[in-house]
Image (cartoon, rainbow, N blue to C red):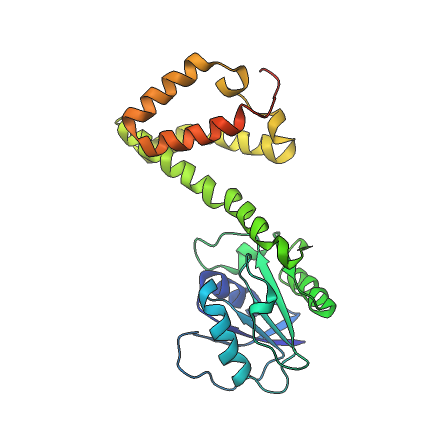
Amino acid sequence: MDHITIIGKSRAGTSIAKALQISPNAKLSAHISARIKKYPLINSEIIIIATKDDQIAAVSKKAVAAASKKLRLIVHLAGSLPSTILSTRPGVARLTLHPIQTFPVPSGHLLRDIYWMASSDDREAIRWSSKFVKGLGGNGVIILKSESLPLYHAMTVFGSNFITLLFSAIEEMASTLGQNPKKMKAVMRSLAEQSLQNALTKPAKSVLSGPIVRKDFATIQKHQRALKSASPRIQAIYKAFLDYGVTLGTPKR
């Protein structure tokens, strides 16, 4: 059984710690703050660093210095960064392991039935990642080369942050209309959920609908004028999607 120390009290790190507390396949040895000046002796085979991206290199250096001879693998959770940013030690493998999930609150349940991304030059580290993910109830691991990580991470931002920001724009437009944003999101829920379901189960461009597909530029111009008056920032978002959408060549619907 692997003994794992987590460094960093981020929501992702705390979620992993909670999941490990009930995992039969690994034991949480310690969960320590990355901010403490000097780390205690880390007597674990595995170290997982769960900090902000710009702190990983410095934290890994302190962690390796504090680790016992048991250490055989050091891991970080930043999806855009290669494993090579981690400090080296002879006989210790390095791994990028990114949960493809968002963590509004720390919860081990959020790690169930999800996929993770793994990247490493070490085959044993990749094999360990698959075992670890399955032990936490995950669906599996996708493996990428280090040079692919920035584009991969940008894709995850599209799949998470940008969806959230679009609903922030909906909240803003609802307020401009004099409507309660919470109520308007409830009104929009069926439309949004069905659209997401369509896009997840079919080629996205085949299920695009509305004036973009119909090439209804008269309606699009009305939208643009209304958005310019209500919020030039949201108009810019609309135009970016319009510029992309009209090139997809989708059938009329």
Of residues 23 and 3, the one drawn nearer to the viewer in this rendering = 3
- Look at the image and tell me in which quarter the C terminus lies: top right
**Picture coordinates of residue 115, whole percent (x, y):** 63, 53
Residue 251 falls in which quadrant of the image?
top right
**Picture coordinates of residue 199, whole percent (x, y):** 59, 32
Number of residue marks: 0
| Residue drawn at the location 53% of the way across and 48% of the way down | 154
Q: In this image, 57 relative to 45: left or right?
A: left
Q: In this image, 141 relative to 238: left or right?
A: right
- Look at the image and tell me in which quarter the N terminus lies: bottom right
**Picture coordinates of residue 175, whole percent (x, y):** 28, 31
**Picture coordinates of residue 235, whole percent (x, y):** 36, 29
| Residue drawn at the location 54% of the way across and 64% of the way down | 16
Of residues 58 and 133, the one drawn nearer to the viewer in this rendering = 58
| Residue drawn at the location 47% of the way across and 74% of the way down | 58
Of residues 68 and 90, the one drawn nearer to the viewer in this rendering = 90
Q: In this image, 1 relative to 9: left or right?
A: right
Residue sticking out furthest to the front: 147
- Relative to 135, does residue 196 appear above or below in the rendering? above
- Relative to 116, does residue 188 appear above or below in the rendering? above
- Relative to 208, does residue 57 appear above or below in the rendering? below
Q: In this image, 171 relative to 87: left or right?
A: left
| Residue drawn at the location 48% of the way across and 31% of the way down | 192
